[in-house]
Amino acid sequence: AAKDAGRNCTVVYSGSLSEAAASRRELEQALRRALDREEFVLHYQAQVNAQGEPEVMEALLRWDSPERGLVPPGEFIPVLEESGMIIEATRWVFREACRQACRWHAMGYSLRIAVNLSPLDFRQADLAGSLLAILEEEGASASMLELEITESALLEADEHVQQTLTRLKAAGLPLLLDDFGTGYASLTYLQRFRFDGIKIDREFVSGLPDSEESVALVRGILTMASHLGLHVVAEGVENERQAAFLRLNGCPSLQGFHYARPQPAAQCRLQQNGRTINLQLPLDA
Ligand code: C2E
Ligand code: MG
Ligand code: MG
Ligand code: MG
């Protein structure tokens, strides 16, 4: 009887496992088609300086699926990563970002576009070469873009990662450490890879200005960054109290729903000096 029960358990268990595996496989195939049919879109979210002027637009990937609707990156990036398709996806994102940066520059906006890299992108032999080739093909300059890299990309911080980052930086692409404070050994990495700046994770910003712990952490990060000559962006700024605290403590750049939600380029609007900037129209229109 015990054997039977065991066998039954095994049947039920492997049944649900293979169901999960099947839907996973289905998602992977749908993503393969999505890449081929270019069903991906980029939404852009502004980073503003202390005067509220937009300086950088972060490109955030969405899958505009005919069957599933607009799918957020958290639901498909892990699958792209596990299947290796992330490398192709990153190339698409970077090319699209180059094109949009050129469009905005032609319209008179000196906005940089920030592109997120996956830790898995560093598995390819020539990440730097492939990104620099795309820049050239699209006629964009390195200073029109920047790269956001999470600490986990640096965990396997070997010679190859270091050489890749050195080459990208030497070509003029600014490097920002994303989600700062949520990973490990960040200080050594900042030194070793000569990052241009850090993005303070939303987790720390959300506690401002009431949580003593968040206040201490954010002040500490801002002081450290200023001593190291690093740029700082605060992520996830959702209200004026958080924004006021950050400005008062010298945070040079702010990003969050308080200023703008991620939007398709065709719908990007920003507030500046009480006036609405429509990024679909030339600057002096
Ligand atoms: P991230 O790079 O840290 O991007 C910030 C995330 O926070 C975005 O979520 C953004 O929509 C959200 N956010 C911005 N402001 C606020 C705010 O005020 N409040 C709250 N609650 N959230 C805010 P999203 O677009 O869902 O992206 C999630 C993550 O997916 C990104 O985190 C990034 O790690 C990854 N991702 C997005 N696009 C790409 C891409 O093209 N390539 C790669 N490799 N990863 C990407
Ligand atoms: Mg980012
Ligand atoms: Mg982030
Ligand atoms: Mg984050």
Image: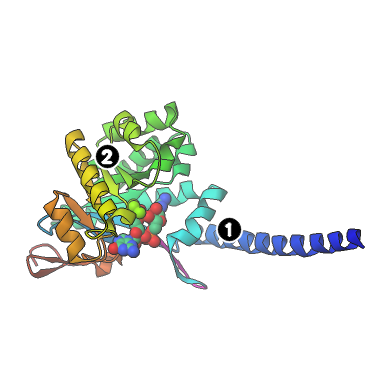
Residue 174 drawn above or below residue 35:
above
Kindly indicate whether the residue at mark 1 contacts the one at mark 2 (C-beta within 8 angstroms): no
Is label 1 in a helix, a strand or a loop? helix
Is residue 226 something that shows in the picture? yes
Residue 95 visible in the displayed image: no
- The three-letter code of the residue at mark 1 reads Glu
Badge 2 amino acid: Leu
Mark 2 or mark 1, which has the lower sequence index? 1
Classify mark 2 as within 8 Å of ligand 2 or not, answering yes or no: no
In the foreground, 159 or 131? 159
Determine crowd level at label 2: few under 14, some 14-19, many 20+ residues with C-alpha closer than 10 A.
Answer: many
Residue at 23% from the left image edge and 52% from the top image edge: 215
Task: Find disc 2 in the rendering and name its residue.
Answer: 173
Q: Secondary structure at mark 2?
A: loop
Is the N terminus in the top left, top right, bottom left or bottom right quadrant?
bottom right
- Of the numbered discs in the image, which one, if any, rests on residue 260? none
Image spot of residue 221 (x, y percent): 24, 43
Q: Badge 1 is on which residue? A: 28
Q: Residue most toward the right?
A: 1
Image point (17%, 65%), residue name: 240
Q: How is the image coloured?
A: rainbow
- Compared with 146, 188 (above or below) is above
Q: Is residue 277 left or right of residue 45?
A: left
Count of marks placed on residues: 2
Q: Mark 2 and mark 1: span between their CA atoms?
A: 32 Å
Q: x and y percent of residue 194 in the render? A: 28, 32
Residue at 61% across, 60% down: 24
268 drawn magenta: no
Dominant SS type (magenta): strand
Question: Range of the magenta residues?
Answer: 62-67
At which x and y percent is residue 127? 41, 38
Name the quadrant of the C terminus.
bottom left
